[in-house]
Image (tube, coloured by chain):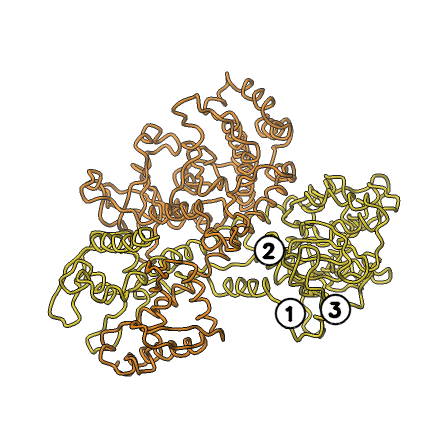
Chain colours: A yellow, B orange
Amino acid sequence: MQQYSPYPQYSQSLIRNKQGRRNMGSFFMSESLKQDIVHQKQLLYMTLDPNDPRIKNIPPMLNKYHSLYPLDQDGAKENQGKMFGYVTSVYKAICTQDGLPYAIRRIEGFRLSSEYALQAAESWRNLQHPNIVSLKEIFVSKEFGDNTLFFTYDYFPGSETIESKFLSQPNQTSFQPISESVLWSFITQLVSALKTIHSLGLVCRVIHPSKILLTGKNRIRLNGVGIFDVVNYDSPRNLAQFQHEDLLLLGRLILTLACRSAASITAQNLSNSIEYVSNTYSKDLYNLIVYLLTKPVINLPNIDEVVTMISGRLLQENNYLHTYTDDLETELGKEYENGRLFRLVTKLGFINERPLYDMDPRWSETGDRYLIKLFRDYIFHQVYDDGTPVLDFYHVVETLNKLDCGVDEKILLMSRDEQSLLVVSYKDLKKCIELAFSELVSQKSHLN
Amino acid sequence: MQQYSPYPQYSQSLIRNKQGRRNMGSFFMSESLKQDIVHQKQLLYMTLDPNDPRIKNIPPMLNKYHSLYPLDQDGAKENQGKMFGYVTSVYKAICTQDGLPYAIRRIEGFRLSSEYALQAAESWRNLQHPNIVSLKEIFVSKEFGDNTLFFTYDYFPGSETIESKFLSQPNQTSFQPISESVLWSFITQLVSALKTIHSLGLVCRVIHPSKILLTGKNRIRLNGVGIFDVVNYDSPRNLAQFQHEDLLLLGRLILTLACRSAASITAQNLSNSIEYVSNTYSKDLYNLIVYLLTKPVINLPNIDEVVTMISGRLLQENNYLHTYTDDLETELGKEYENGRLFRLVTKLGFINERPLYDMDPRWSETGDRYLIKLFRDYIFHQVYDDGTPVLDFYHVVETLNKLDCGVDEKILLMSRDEQSLLVVSYKDLKKCIELAFSELVSQKSHLN
């Protein structure tokens, strides 16, 4: 069971170093997690440069959305129209109502025949699933010139399609098969989405590498749901047949990923591809692909049978996810401390060295606030015997923690002229600082 | 699929308030999550009061562990010895090697017959599973007077047994059945643990409400693994028979929890209990319990069949876990800022108001460091027109963020006597502060 986990592993064990001190990494979240978060935050509010040539084709406002930013890659245009029968383009935009970013897909050249067509996608709007990009709303607007249909979805900064991640290899030398545990993770996520979709009497139809988003490390979400329901509203539909087609699409997708080649599912390559899978991956994976791709003799295969087939893998996925949540909880435990300490230091910043206190006798050497000043020196301005400054992050954290708890431990504070010494407990310091701060606060409310 | 999730739901949506400002809750992790973390951290390093009467029975040092703290509840003694045939007690203790807390279980009165008995538990020491409390080591010590056997496990602060959580009801009026989604979550977790255990050719034998820990909201872990292997080392064992007994124990446990009564599995109550389940819960749950408790006619039931039976529930559990990880990632996205800002404020603390600088002309009104002083006032010491202090946390965060990025934006700094004004960009401030800090650092290395 000690397979490589498809999910990130951030937390290092909290082993101490030789001096018995915690590693710096045990105070802050791991660097890789931080990088992920920073990158996503940057993308979240990215806007077009006013000098960008694309800006002249983009309206300043679309329905209730502003700050449109094109998300399509440059090379993506060539495949346009293959999926839905219409050219589509995607923009990030900020909603004026809640201030949050969304992804808006524009269906170019589609003429809405009736309002009923929009209602065909209504079921999708109420669907919440961790592996489906939620459809928020559908609207028609003339802002791009013609009368166009727009689909608003949740936006996932930094996401990438499975196609661009695994199927567009510039140099074939770097070809690496996707590890089996990652493939099974993808399968469990897609099967989970399909199970929900089929249970609601819906059909997915977008199980294609270009419509599956990687929204985190090996976390995938089906994208573009509901578009077919509107665009093909007038076509006759056979639910059982379409649902079976979803399973066929799933089988093709798995085979494509296992071979890392979009050409693996063409008629002339199919048998070679399946042989490659049987040589490279487990019997389980081979069996699943064959089950999904084989023409049914009597009954159509259905998603419930697939769920039963992969039950052992679902169990494994649960284990990975539990371990991942443990990891995230550990990281949160570290960062929560920082929030607390940051607020405490901010409080000290508000209190210390206020110009108003320059002449206040309570802050002079005989006043009761004097020790806050000395304590500030104790935290930040200590020096070693040879006069070099103590720049010890651990000392700051430890001191602030003891202050926050108000422990009984006593420390020795020395005046700057080294002429007077004060012995005081953290408990008393805490009281003193809280009093000083609450006076600041009430000073405010008093004069307001 | 919109069932109540058995896992916590912390994150609120990031809706802005009327002024377009983010809620305080969007800066820091949610209050309930914080409370959980604070509570766990407090328990992690709890020590016995020197005046506590229990301290006279506890050695100061046990093997390589110190600061022993008894974890047994007062009332727990009466059931002692029922599980393993020996009275046991549990202590939290800190390991001198890594400084981390562990839970140590003492087996009173057991005489180790041979060293081989200890090796019987060796497989457990290498077992990592998200639903099993890891066994770290086994040792013999005389510190408690007699020659006793000790088992060291991972420690989970704030954990509680299933027994004390769900089966010890002081007042029967507050009786509430456990929701079906929570029950299935427990089942998937236990089945996952059992699957791993049985795959390794091991037997669990501790599937009992008193040996299952709740280590988070509805997150469970099997506790006390490996003890039977050592204590019953001399008894003959039949693996298939014991593994089937694990399934029987699982069935009894589920029935006990569904009825919330330890008496539900006695011979005279059994049929009533099963009828209660069939009236209260789904057909699936009823079928599983009957499958586990029924005497097999031909083949013994095995864990793989159970995994297949509950595959749909495993899928559901995956969804809950994915949603929970989304939630935790959102919380982390908020808190990650804190570590960065805390480090920045600490840096400012090191630099500002150092006694050494009192006479330094560079920090005087004509020096190049003077603006750091004024910037400190700008962050913390601003006042409104009526003289009341600005105690605006948002202002501090925003200013520090701009400083950290070194943006081009210029601000107006005013001297304390309001006689001179300085216009300076965050970019220049950042440069100036970095220079001041690096001088502090090099001052250190120079003299060392």
Amino acid bearing label 1: Leu
Instruction: Tell me which chain the residue with mark 2 is part of.
Output: A
User: Alpha carbon of mark 1 to alpha carbon of mark 3: how far?
Assistant: 12 Å
**Disc 3 marks which residue?**
A57
| Residue B83 horizontal/vertical position (percent) | 40, 32
| Residue A289 horizontal/vertical position (percent) | 75, 52
User: Alpha carbon of mark 3 to alpha carbon of mark 2: how far?
Assistant: 23 Å
Residue at far top of view: B268
Query: Which residue occupies 23% across, 77% down?
Result: B358
**Disc 1 marks which residue?**
A48
**Disc 2 marks which residue?**
A100
User: Residues at marks 1 and 2, common chain?
Assistant: yes
Instruction: Tell me which chain the residue with mark 3 is part of.
Output: A
Pick the front one: A190 or A398 = A398
Q: How many marks?
A: 3
User: Residues at marks 1 and 3, common chain?
Assistant: yes
How dense is the environment of label 3, judged by Cα within 10 Å: few (below 14), some, or many (20 and up)? few
Pick the front one: A51 or B91 = A51
| Residue B269 horizontal/vertical position (percent) | 51, 18
